[in-house]
Amino acid sequence: MAFHVVDWLPPDFGAVGQHAVIHARGLAEQGAKVCLVGLSSRVSAPTRETSLHSGLLEFKRLPAKRYDKQNAVRRLVWSLATNARLILEIIRDRRSRNADLLFTGSPPFMLFFAFFAKWTRGMRLVYRITDFYPEVLIAAYGKTTALSILERMTWFFRHRVDEFQVLGEDQRRILESHGILPERITLLRDIPPFAMSGNETAAQRPAALDGYKILLYSGNYGVAHEINTVIQGLKYHHREGRARFGLWLNASGSAVSEMTGALRDAGIPFALTAPVNVNDLAGILLAADALLISLRSEFSGYVMPSKVYGCVASGRPIVFVGPETSDVHLLCQQAGDVNYEHITPGDVEGFSAALDRLSRLSDRD
């Protein structure tokens, strides 16, 4: 028996939960018995799926309310309380004795709560590194004394995890540089959260961008993502470049208001819509002329933007604003049939030039 614990399960928005369902279904199809535990904004009874190979996938959705991401204290309180709820749900399940427990960085700091399950139920811990906490906080706010202490505590517990699953080679390098043995690390990338058959219909393009090529950002746009290069690059593109692209933010997150405010003040065309359900994501990607992925250099390896898998699968041109050390760059380079533009954070003119090149490409199509 294996237990997987994440934050939000579909149909609620959350990339970690979407990919967790894919991986859990894959294990069930191989004959495993998996219980996936997560949060839901609606009340629902446990559900089960069976496979042809006697596998079982059980969903346990705990009702929960969204938290205020802008308030650090409330976010911390919510995360700690939520971690406790999720782990207690697993501990109370009699099947958890000596079972595997796979957890991620969502919710944050689940690592510490997972050890309570290890000590009380003898569970084997598998840490799937979706992102590194508290390193992402250090990258965002600087290395305070409190965060330094928390980082040392975190590595103490990481060294006692039974197995790691990493999403990229950049994450593997970080673990090995801190003394995690290579044989305890497995590279297991995510896959696109949808299948592309070639028969998908593109979603309707926003009316606010009529007459423009569309650069799409879909998903969470937060503190880990490069903002200034995108804003200034779009300004430069409209002031000195071909002025062909507008930005479609099919997004939520802490950076959205800053992005939209700056673009509105500069008169740059943009549209803002809420993130869609994973079942509708393919149509949104296909409606765009190019897809944007962004990552601040400080977060390289600590955060892996999961949208890269869907972007590559869509076949649309990709604009990545971020460091070459990130596996986003590696994956986009390896996708030989995708038109890929890489921009180093801070290269405003390079961003504009990339949009100019892509606009000429789409003009010929």
Image: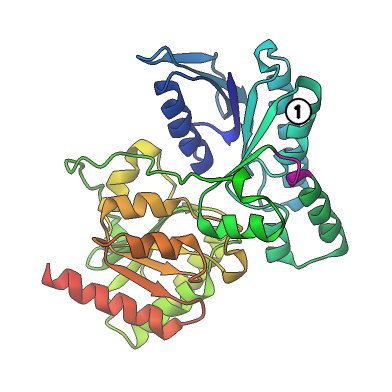
Q: Is residue 144 visible?
A: yes
Magenta: predominant secondary structure element? loop
Q: Nearer the viewer, residue 190 or 314?
A: 190
Q: Position of residue 189 (x, y in %)?
A: 46, 46
At 60% from the left edge and 60% from the top edge, which residue is drawn? 173
Task: Say few, some or many: other residues with alpha carbon within 10 Å of mark 1 (under 14 / 14 to 19 / 20 or more).
Answer: many
Return the residue nearer the eye: 118 or 271.
118
Q: Which residues are magenta?
A: 157-161
Of the 4 image quadrants, the one containing the N terminus is: top right
- Residue 222 visible in image: no
Measured as percent of width and height from the top left, residue 185 is found at 59, 46
Q: Position of residue 62 (x, y in %)?
A: 62, 23
Q: Which residue is mark 1?
A: 118
User: For the point 15% across and 72% down, which residue is it?
Assistant: 363
| Residue 141 lies in the magenta stretch | no
Residue 188 placement, left or right of 300: left
In the picture as drawn, the residue positioned furthest to the bottom comes out as 240
Identify the image quadrant of residue 223: bottom right
Residue at x 52% of width, y 31% of height = 9
- For image coordinates 81% across by 58% down, the residue present is 147
Taking the image as shown, residue 100 lies to the left or right of residue 196, namely: right
Looking at the rendered structure, the number of numbered marks drawn on it comes to 1
Q: Quadrant of residue 242?
A: bottom left
Return the x and y of residue 261 as percentages of the image width and height: 52, 68
Front in this rendered view, residue 306 or 351: 306
160 in the magenta segment: yes
Quadrant of the rendered image containing residue 40:
top right
Query: Left of 73 or right of it: where is 6?
Result: left
What's the residue type where badge 1 is placed?
A: Lys
Q: Is residue 210 above or below residue 306?
A: below
